[in-house]
Amino acid sequence: MSIEGKKIIVTGSASGMGEATLKAYVQAGASVIGMDVSDDTGGLICENANKDGPGKCSYLHVDVSDKSSVSDAFANANDILGGLDVLAHPAAIQRSSDASEVSVEDWDLMFAINVKGTMLTNQIAQSYMKLNGGGSIINFGSISGLRPEPAASAYSAAKGAVHSWTRTAAGSWGKDNIRVNAILPAIATPMYRAARERSSEEENLASHWRNSVPIALGQEYGDPEKDLAPVMVFFASDASKFITGQLIPVDGGQTAGL
Ligand SMILES: NC(=O)c1ccc[n+]([C@@H]2O[C@H](COP(=O)([O-])OP(=O)(O)OC[C@H]3O[C@@H](n4cnc5c(N)ncnc54)[C@H](O)[C@@H]3O)[C@@H](O)[C@H]2O)c1
């Protein structure tokens, strides 16, 4: 389970699961580059992580939907780290959109950040990992990509695409000892809280959120540091070296109810 000295990029590191993942990796002795569009918060999170150590962290700006931004940031990160072992890729957006009303603009934005962003970051990470003899890519899917989501049609379609991409990339890059998996989380973060606020009264009362998590026991969704971060350490470590192409729910059993 050790990740001491591993060279890791974490996208979406300025909030939620990216922030918790970055902190856990630095606490476990890894060398980490955090990346986000939210530079002030991203920089501060990294600075604070460095105070505690024992690993180390630097922050770089990236817009994962922009090919030259991803190429530049990952080249810079690869230079700073001296190689790349792990990409943790939580960066994404979530928006509401009814299937009969979703606009082309919302659809394109969702696919640019959540789907193209996954392809671009994975592809460039793979090119560096290959030189290092292998690595682990950890994408983020969603239960929304498995079940009907009347309130979030574009997000649901985009996460379904992330699932397919994850399996395909795993199939393509296994020969280079690069594994690719996707976490399907149910974790209380700013994204989750914003989605709850946008939900209808009916959805908030129904099993859509609350009763669908069998082991939640008083908490609705999981805790980023206690429930998600240890799994992220496992998938960054060599302990997970025989797992690839999988969609891994970290959701207290939510998907078991589908
Ligand atoms: N919270 C949940 O329960 C839940 C459920 C299912 C799936 N997910 C997925 O888990 C992942 C992490 O979600 P979270 O809840 O921590 O979200 P969050 O909103 O707390 O954090 C997402 C981060 O991504 C960054 N980001 C957005 N667009 C970007 C871009 N173009 N380039 C770089 N960074 C960008 C944001 O600035 C933010 O810091 C996402 O992929 C999300 O879709 C979350």
Image (cartoon, rainbow, N blue to C red):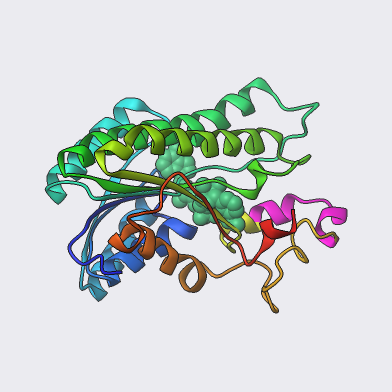
Based on the displayed image, in which of its 4 quarters is residue 177 positioned?
top left
Specify the farthest residue to the right: 202
Query: Which quadrant is the N terminus positioned in?
Result: bottom left
Query: In the rendering, at what x and y percent does residue 150 appear?
Result: 78, 39
Q: Tell me which residue sits at (35%, 66%) in the image.
A: 23
Q: Is residue 191 visible?
A: no
Q: Is residue 104 above or below residue 188?
A: above
Q: Is residue 162 left or right of residue 56?
A: right
- Horizontal and vertical percent position of residue 193: 64, 59
Q: Position of residue 256 (x, y in %)?
A: 69, 59
Q: Is residue 170 visible?
A: yes
Residue drawn where x is 22% and y is 69% of the image: 29
Q: Nearer the viewer, residue 93 or 225?
A: 225
| Residue at x-position 31% and y-position 31% | 69
Please give left or right for residue 134 compared with residue 20 in the image: left
In the image, residue 43 lies in the stretch drawn in magenta: no
**Does the magenta stretch mainly form a helix, a strand or a loop?**
helix
The vertical placement of 131 against 59, above or below, is above
Q: List the single residue furthest toward the top.
A: 104
Report the residue that reaches farthest toward the bottom: 218
Answer with left or right where residue 190 lies relative to residue 74. right
Magenta span of residues: 194-205
Estimate the x, y position of residue 231 in percent, counting from the top left: 44, 64
Which is more toward the observer, 94 or 127?
A: 127
